[in-house]
Amino acid sequence: MAKAQENTALANSEMPFEQALKELEAIVRKLESGAGDLEGSITEYVRGTELKEFCLDKLKTARLKVESILKTQTNGQEDTFSLQPFDAK
C-alpha cells in the first residue's frame, strides 16, 4: 500500500521534469558505482523506477501537446498553426 501511495504522490507532484531527470541520473550513477549497501540500493532502485515512470509520463504529455498543434492552410495564404484539444490519458 505504501508503494502505491508513493507512486501517486510522485505522479501528482509539481516536480519539474528536469529536476526528476537529474535525480534519476544521480541514482543511476550511484547504483552503477556499486556504492551503498543492499537495502539502500533497493530503496534507490525503487525511487529510480518511480522517477523513470514520472519522466516517461511527462514526455508523453509533452509529445501529445506537440502533436496537437496542427498545421493548417488558410485560403492559399501563409501557413498558420492552431492548437487542438488533446486527451493526456
Image: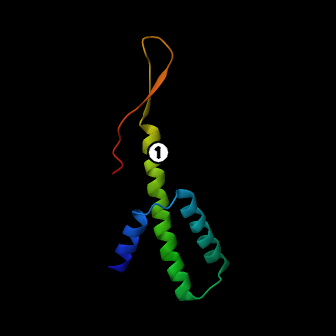
Please state which amino acid type lies under the numbered disc 1.
Arg
Does 18 appear above or below 80? below
Quick one: which residue is furthest to the top in this view? 76
**Residue at image coords 52%, 87%:** 39
**Residue at image coords 45%, 63%:** 53
Question: Residue 45 vs residue 4: left or right?
Answer: right
Residue 3 drawn at (x, y percent): 38, 77
Does 70 appear above or below 87? above
Quick one: which residue is furthest to the front in this view? 14
Question: Residue 53 vs residue 21: left or right?
Answer: left
Does 80 appear above or below 32? above
Provide the secondary structure element on which disc 1 rests: helix
Residue 62 drawn at (x, y percent): 47, 47
User: According to the image, what is the colour scheme of the structure?
Assistant: rainbow
Count the numbered circles shown: 1
**Residue at image coords 47%, 22%:** 80
Residue 9 drawn at (x, y percent): 39, 69
Q: Tell me the quarter of the picture where residue 73 sits.
A: top left
Q: Residues within 10 Å of mark 1 (few under 14, many from 20)?
A: few
Quarter occupied by the N terminus: bottom left
Q: Pointer 1: what residue?
A: 63
**Residue at image coords 47%, 39%:** 66
Does 86 appear above or below 10? above
Residue 32 drawn at (x, y percent): 64, 75
Q: Tell me the quarter of the picture where residue 33 sits.
A: bottom right
